Structure formats: C-alpha cells, structure tokens
Amino acid sequence: MSSAKRDIRLDALRGLFLVVMVMDHFPSWLNGLTYESIGYVTAAEGFVFLSGYVAGQVYGRYSAGETSRHLWWRAVLRALRIYGYHATTLVILFTAAAVFKLKTFGLENWAPQFYSHPLPALGMGLILCYQPHFLDILPMYCLFILFTPVVVKSRKLWHFSAILTISLLAWLTVQFGAWKYFEDLFANIPTVYFGTFDPLAWQLLFILGVMAGKTKVFEFLSAHPLRKALLAFCLIVAVGLYLLRHQVFLLHHLGINVNVDQTDSLATKNSLGPIRLLNFAVVAVIVGGYLVWPASNPCVKALGYLGRYSIQVFSFHLLTLYFVYGKFLHSSSRAAWACLSVLSLSIPAAICHWARSTKTPACLKVPKTELTKSNAE
C-alpha cells in the first residue's frame, strides 16, 4: 500500500481550532472575536468532527486491504496513544496539587478533588470517571476512535443507515435528559464527574465526521450540479443563526415573537442541542466544500505545523490553563497574555518535531506505515 501524503488543509484547520480554543479559554476581550463568533458554533465542534473526518479517511483506506481484526488493532493503538497524553496530563496536575501542594486558580476551582480526595480522584481519573474542567475532550476522542472500524467496514447503504440511526437515537435521548439521569446515579460520589460534554450527544458529530471522511462527501458536494443552490441555502441559514445568536435579528419587526432563552436551550453546548447541530452542519458544508486553503500561504503552514501535533499541543494548552489562568484574571494586559499563550503553542510542536526528526538507532526504529505519515497523527 502506498504511503498517504499529509493534507496540510486538514492540519491547518486543526491548528486553527487550537488557536481559537486558546482564545476562548483565556479571559480577554478577544473572547468576543472567537467564542461563537459565527453563530452557535465553537472550535470544540470542529475539533471533534474533524477528528472523525480524518479517522474516516485514514481507516477507510486501510479497510479495503485489511481485516477487521487489523483495523481494530490500529484503532486500539490510536486510542491508547490519546489516553496516554490524557493520563500524563492528569498525573502532572495531580502531582502538583496533591504532592507539591501547589495552589492555582485552575487546580483549586477545576480539580478540587485532588485536594480533598486525592488518591480516589486520581484512580477515577485514570479510568475516565473523573474528568476535571477542560479534561473531557481527549477521553471522548479516546472512546470515539474505537467506533471507527465499525463505520469504515460498512460497505452497504443499509449498514451506514443503521449506524447513523443508532447514533441519532443516542443523541436524541440526551435531548430528553438521558445523560443527566445517568450522571445523577453517581451524584453522591464526589470523585465521579464525567465533564461538561455529554458523550452520547457528541458521538453524533464524530460519527458524521467518520462517514464524511469515508465517503468523501465534501468532494462529492463540490462537484454536484446543485452545489451553488446548496451553498446559497447554507449561507442563508448560517447568517440567520448568526444574527439570532448575537440578538440583532429583530424578528419582532416581522411580527414574530422569539423566546431567546428557549432558543438558547435548544442550542446548548454540553448536549449539542438541535440548533447548534444545524448551525455546525451548514458551516461545515460551507467550509468543507467551498473554502480554499492555499498550501503555500505562511499562515496556513504555521497553523498546519500546530495541527500536525494537535494532541500534544492540546495537552500542553491544558497545563498552561491550569497553572497560569489565575494570573490572567488579575492582569491588566490579558489580551497580550492570551496572544502570548497562542505563540507558546509552538513550543510543544517544536519539541515533537525535533523528537521525530532526531536520528534513531537502527535497532530502535519502527517501520513507517501509512498511519504514521497520515493526518491521523
């Protein structure tokens, strides 16, 4: 099987999501320019969908020439690698709080169980039952990647339809409080916390991403005769939701009364409400099918550099949040510090690039496969 070249456009998108996440998480006036700036859409939705899309592309290529057993093994190895970065981040934070008694805004407010119930919290964290604030994205990714072989091995339409139906039903149960009911079962256990995202809802984004990557749906849409009509429809919906999100769409002038609170409840982030899902869908079609990323552009190259090491960069970003967030809250130059945090993302990327390019003794070299050269990294 021939090696697959990396698609810098996908890396650049991942890099862009990482930059936006940093801007969203650190307090400054820049939040208003990045957080839900184009409607009920954040970088988190893009990160999860794109992770599924890349997985669908990469594992889709493998599925043609490999057995299900080999495909599962690849998915398990990938999941273990993601889990390794999550566990390492968790242990570093635990060590800082429980061993060295370090007190920061992030540790005290986002991971209080490391102080009150240190060992149970660490144990629960390692089995993904305690996910402090911001430490719930990688566990979801880790679990979702295990579903990839099921989707990419589906070669018949009814297989795809069945998987999508099950995924939609799981998402729908969350809209009626299923995940909240599940969390309430563990309400009396202080070291059990599954994070702010409902995985039963967010799995839909990942599954849709895998299907889109496997079927190359964006390439299909770009070449479809009705592409202009589809683009016009998506733009109208996206603009309408943007205006609604920012409350400048004065529908009452048309005699329509809109309950903003009710609208926001249908666009909740933790349960991936229907309005948020629709908003992301139209934005994904616009970006995926019609946006041109010039590979030679310096900004695209810089973002692609970050996106290539997205898991490492994201983990570094989490540590930065936990250790220096409090400094930002009391700083008069928060925007400047937020920009500096974005620039600091190049540190883990540079370290990973150096480690990968360092000459390895022949006896320790691992044979390069398509996976190691693909965007799945």
Image (tube, helix red, strand yellow):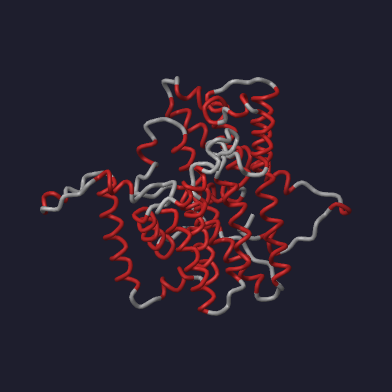
Q: Is residue 237 above or below residue 227?
A: above
Residue 8 x %, y %: 55, 57
Task: Classify residue 249 as left or right of residue 324.
Answer: left
Task: Classify residue 46 as left or right of residue 83.
Answer: left
Q: Answer whether residue 39 is visible to the viewer in this image.
A: no
Q: Residue furthest right?
A: 363
Q: 91 and 216: which one is in front?
A: 91
Give the image quarter of residue 322: top right
Q: Residue at x 47, y 36 (%)?
A: 25
Give the image quarter of residue 2: bottom right
Q: How many marks?
A: 0
Q: Is residue 231 above or below residue 248?
A: below
Q: 234 and 271: which one is in front?
A: 271
Residue 345 x %, y %: 57, 38
Q: Is the C terminus in the top left, top right, bottom left or bottom right quadrant?
A: bottom right
Q: Is the N terminus in the top left, top right, bottom left or bottom right quadrant?
A: bottom right
Q: Residue at x 55, y 39 (%)?
A: 193
Q: Residue at x 55, y 43 (%)?
A: 136
Q: Answer whether residue 240 is visible to the viewer in this image.
A: yes
Task: Classify residue 281 as left or right of residue 321.
Answer: left
Residue 149 x %, y %: 63, 66
Q: Residue at x 58, y 56 (%)?
A: 144
Residue 276 x %, y %: 37, 53
